[in-house]
Image (tube, rainbow, N blue to C red):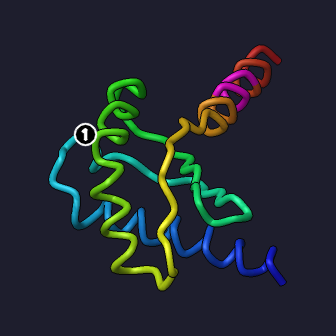
Amino acid sequence: MQQVKLERFNNAFMEQLNIIFGTTIKNPILKKVVVTGVAITNDLSFAKVYFTCFDEDKNLVLKELKESASFLRGELSKKVEIRHTPELTFEYDSSLEYARRIEEKIKEINEEK
């Protein structure tokens, strides 16, 4: 039961954060952020937000996200029905970059044939 509830919250947070980045956020650096996943702890006190960004320095984006964490948490509390909105931490999701590099290597190999 608890795992299903956590999964629902993870999905709701991911969906709402992507909406917030697309519509509510005014910071042009954060407008390019895409949330790829959320992992909320079992006690619902912390949420790790995985993100990627296009055409931006990931360290600068991470800094801006940390500065905007309380605003984002406040916006989430308005949109997701949860007794206590978890503290947000952010982690860059490099899996898309990794997949892109693999795809480029496969193209190179195919071109050599």
Residue 77 sits in which quadrant?
A: bottom left
Residue at horizontal 60%, vertical 57%? 38
The percent position of residue 72, horizontal first and vertical second, equals 33, 59
- Quarter holding the N terminus is bottom right
Residue 17 to residue 108: above or below: below
Between 92 and 78, the one nearer to me in the picture: 78
The percent position of residue 24, horizontal first and vertical second, equals 22, 65
Q: From the viewer's perspective, is 106 left or right of 27?
A: right
Residue at horizontal 54%, vertical 75%? 12
All told, the count of numbered labels is: 1
Dominant SS of magenta comes to helix
Q: From the viewer's perspective, is 19 left or right of 81?
A: left
Residue at the extreme left of the image, as rendered: 26
Residue 87 to residue 16: above or below: above
Residue 58 to residue 77: above or below: above
Q: Which residue is mark 1?
A: 29
Q: Callout 1, which amino acid?
A: Ile
Residue 97 sits in which quadrant?
A: top right
State the extent of the magenta-drawn residues as a range: 101-105
Magenta segment: does it hold 7? no
- Quarter holding the C terminus is top right
Residue at horizontal 22%, vertical 57%? 25
Between 99 and 88, the one nearer to me in the picture: 88
Between 66 and 35, the one nearer to me in the picture: 66
Q: From the viewer's perspective, is 15 left or right of 107?
A: left
The percent position of residue 89, horizontal first and vertical second, equals 50, 45
The percent position of residue 49, horizontal first and vertical second, equals 54, 50
Magenta segment: does it hold 104? yes
Q: Determine crowd level at label 1: few under 14, some 14-19, many 20+ residues with C-alpha closer than 10 A.
A: some
- Secondary structure beneath dot 1 equals loop
